[in-house]
Image (spheres, grey):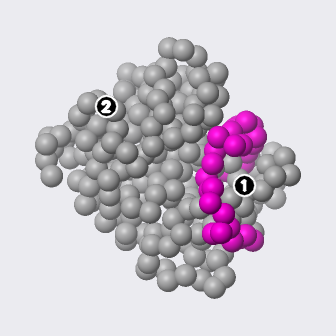
């Protein structure tokens, strides 16, 4: 699920709250902010599309598609897109955007995926993996549904972000959760992400059978300079998200360990 806002300046601990990451409760407000925000519309999505390159005719799984802006852009570029998300509310918005001819499924990425081995040429996972404490089972499933030579293109919160903002700072080398609140229409929304050190991320990809192709820290779209002059400077001079392209080795078979 793409996030609509940058990491807040101050974290509000919400560990005592039972419900976190409940996108169904704020789907409309989230989708509206996500649509044209600096970090999504002029940074994260353009970077994902640039990494994907020419997708004409490619079968792409949008894992955590949210309300569907990335799916729409990929489809408009000629891809055959399937979207999955854990939030039925977000998928209802995606259906409204994408129409009835696109395959959309309510799927939690912690569960097995309802697709055949090698069903996709690419998977895009836009700002979703940081919702998971353990990437292992999810990455294994994403590898399974990719053909040999297929790519996983993923973006996550940069591991330095939560490390430098939290007070006291956590053990950088540990996998730690951090909780905070977004605010939509004056209502606080409790969220929880998981921060991993960089080596744990790359180890998770290789353990799942992927080959690391690229790690990227891109710049925002230059068009944002005039639209968001203050935010553009901040976004272009500090860490925000980290992008990966990893591949299934071309000689791999779906039955490989």
Q: Where is mark 1, residue-wise? A: 189
Q: For residue 240, which quarter of the picture?
A: bottom right
- Left or right of 61 on screen, residue 149: left
Q: Is residue 36 visible?
A: no
Expressed as whole percent of the image width and height from the top left, the position of residue 204 reads 32, 62
Label 1 to label 2: alpha-carbon separation: 32 Å
Residue positioned 63% across, 48% down in the render: 22
Is 33 magenta? The answer is yes
Of tags 1 and 2, which is closer to the observer?
Answer: 1
Region of the chain picked out in magenta, as a range: 10-39
In terms of depth relative to the viewer, which is nearer, 55 or 179? Answer: 179
SS at circle 1: strand
Q: Is residue 174 above or below residue 123?
A: below
Q: Is residue 23 left or right of residue 47?
A: right
Q: Badge 1 local density, few (<14 within 10 Å), some, or many (20+)?
A: some
| 89 or 248: nearer the viewer | 89
Residue drawn 39% across and 39% down?
Answer: 123
In this orientation, which residue lies closer to the viewer: 13 or 230? 13
Residue 233 at what x, y percent from top left? 74, 60
Foreground residue among 99 and 126: 99
Q: Give the position of the N terminus as an image quadrant.
A: top right
Q: Quadrant of residue 20?
A: bottom right
Q: Earlier in the sequence, mark 1 or mark 2?
A: 2
Is residue 195 placed above or below 48 in the rendered structure? Answer: below
| Residue at image coords 46%, 29% | 105
Identify the residue at horizontal 54%, vertical 22% (top origin).
Answer: 76
Say what secondary structure mark 2 lies in.
loop
Residue on which disc 2 sits: 115
Pinpoint residue 176: horizontal percent, then vertical percent.
50, 73
């Amino acid at each position: 699920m793409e996030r609509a806002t940058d990491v807040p300046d101050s974290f509000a601990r919400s560990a005592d709250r039972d419900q976190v990451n409940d996108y169904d409760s704020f789907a409309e407000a989230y989708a509206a902010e996500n649509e044209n925000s600096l970090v999504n519309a002029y940074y994260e999505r353009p970077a994902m599309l640039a990494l994907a390159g020419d997708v004409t005719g490619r079968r792409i799984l949008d894992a955590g598609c949210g309300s569907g802006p990335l799916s729409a852009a990929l489809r408009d570029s000629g891809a055959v897109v399937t979207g999955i998300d854990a939030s039925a509310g977000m998928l209802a918005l995606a259906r409204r955007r994408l129409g009835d001819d696109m395959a959309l499924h309510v799927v939690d990425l912690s569960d097995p995926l309802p697709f055949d081995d090698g069903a996709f040429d690419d998977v895009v996972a836009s700002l979703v993996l940081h919702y998971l404490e353990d990437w292992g089972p999810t990455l294994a499933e994403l590898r399974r549904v990719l053909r040999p030579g297929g790519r996983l293109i993923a973006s996550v919160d940069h591991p330095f972000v939560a490390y430098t903002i939290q007070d006291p700072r956590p053990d950088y080398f540990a996998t730690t959760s951090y909780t905070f609140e977004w605010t939509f229409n004056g209502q606080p929304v409790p969220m929880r992400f998981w921060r991993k050190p960089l080596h744990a991320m790359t180890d998770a990809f290789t353990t799942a059978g992927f080959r690391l192709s690229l790690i990227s820290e891109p710049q925002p779209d230059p068009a944002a300079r005039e639209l968001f002059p203050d935010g553009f400077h901040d976004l272009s001079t500090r860490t925000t998200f980290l992008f990966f392209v990893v591949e299934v080795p071309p000689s791999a078979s779906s039955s490989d360990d």
